[in-house]
């Protein structure tokens, strides 16, 4: 069975080459780009990837679009800041050659945070379904932390080789990612799900997030990096709840105005 590797990108000139080279053994590589203004498209094209433009509509929609462009049903899906390790490559090749494939495979993802491997704090093994038969599921429609959702009767295997995730390269980058992406999108997801919050819940949720990451999930074992991860987990949770409060307030004001 042939394999198609698919990658979504936007201004990833620092990452795209390594991502593509980690899957250069695949039968086909497709990059779906949402309008990069740097050299992402140029680099991907020179490395032999098929590059297709799609206006950004969200992570899940981009990934469903990418997998549906593939010539093969067997899909290996990556983000541009992820890499397939040699061990994972060997495992995938072996199961393809065996001809006995499950419908989807869970892969452990190992994050590299500020240059350090993170194995605690809830960050590892962080199993992700990234190898799958596209006819047996699709990416769910969550606006953040999207995941491939296999069919209810799908067979699911687990691989041992890591998928490397070069997540954050500086403290400033981590803070900016939370402020611009994770907290706003997380709040929007909570709002869509009908969740509510308040000042006390926001504060307590932030404290709980730090305690869970640093103590219960042994983040302290990762040294000061573990502390920073726990701190940002608390910061993200608190900010997410504050943004949700704003959304709820705006909704109440709109309801009042609509009744007048």
Image: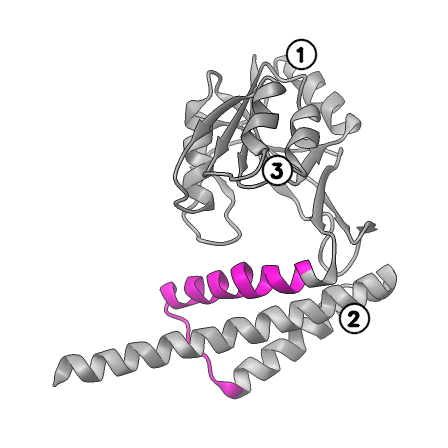
- Residue at the spot x=85%, y=59% of the render? 222
Residue 179 among magenta residues: yes
Choose mark 2 or mark 3, whichever is in front: 3
For label 3, the residue is 80
Q: Residue at x 79, y 71 (%)?
A: 215
Q: Could you give the CA–CA distance between mark 1 and mark 3, rounded to whole angstroms?
A: 27 Å
Task: Check disc 1 and report its element: helix, strand or loop.
Answer: helix
Q: Is residue 248 above or below residue 163?
A: below
Mark 2–mark 1 contact, CB under 8 Å? Answer: no
Q: Quadrant of the N terminus?
A: top right
Magenta-drawn segment? 173-199
Distance Cα–Cα, label 2 vs label 3: 31 Å
Task: Provide residue 135's location: percent of width, then percent of height.
Answer: 43, 26
**Residue 109 magenta-drawn?**
no
Which residue bears the numbered disc 1?
A: 97
Task: Specify which label sits upstream in the sequence, 2 or 3.
Answer: 3
Secondary structure found at label 2: helix
Q: Is residue 26 above or below residue 139?
A: above
Instruction: Determine the residue positioned at 52% across, 44% down.
Output: 147
Q: Residues within 10 Å of mark 1 (few under 14, many from 20)?
A: few
Res 237 → quadrant: bottom right
Please state the horizontal and vertical placement of residue 245, each as a whole percent of the image.
43, 79
Q: Which quadrant of the structure image shows residue 159? A: top right
Can you identify the residue that label 2 sits on? Answer: 215
Q: How many marks?
A: 3
Q: Secondary structure at mark 3?
A: loop
Q: What secondary structure characterizes most of the magenta part?
A: helix
Q: Quadrant of the C terminus?
A: bottom left
């Amino acid at each position: 069975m042939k394999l198609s590797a698919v990658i979504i990108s936007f201004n990833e000139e620092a990452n795209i080459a390594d991502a593509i080279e980690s899957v250069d053994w695949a039968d086909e590589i497709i990059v779906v780009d949402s309008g990069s203004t740097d050299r992402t498209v140029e680099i991907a094209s020179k490395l032999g990837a098929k590059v297709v433009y799609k206006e950004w509509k969200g992570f899940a929609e981009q990934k469903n679009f990418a997998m549906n462009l593939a010539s093969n049903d067997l899909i290996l899906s990556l983000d541009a800041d992820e890499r397939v390790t040699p061990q994972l490559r060997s495992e995938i090749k072996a199961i393809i050659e065996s001809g006995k494939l499950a419908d989807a495979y869970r892969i452990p993802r190992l994050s590299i945070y500020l240059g350090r491997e993170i194995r605690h704090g809830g960050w590892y093994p962080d199993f992700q379904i990234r190898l799958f038969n596209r006819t047996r599921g699709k990416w769910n429609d969550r606006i953040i932390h999207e995941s491939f959702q296999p069919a209810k009767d799908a067979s699911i295997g687990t691989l041992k080789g890591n998928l490397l995730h070069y997540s954050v390269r500086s403290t400033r980058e981590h803070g900016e990612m939370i402020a611009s992406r994770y907290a706003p999108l997380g709040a929007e997801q909570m709002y869509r799900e009908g969740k509510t919050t308040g000042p006390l819940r926001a504060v307590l949720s932030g404290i709980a997030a730090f305690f869970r990451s640093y103590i219960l999930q042994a983040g302290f074992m990762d040294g000061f990096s573990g502390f920073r991860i726990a701190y940002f987990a608390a910061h993200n949770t608190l900010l997410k709840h504050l943004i949700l409060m704003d959304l709820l307030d705006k909704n109440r004001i709109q309801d009042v105005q609509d009744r007048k």
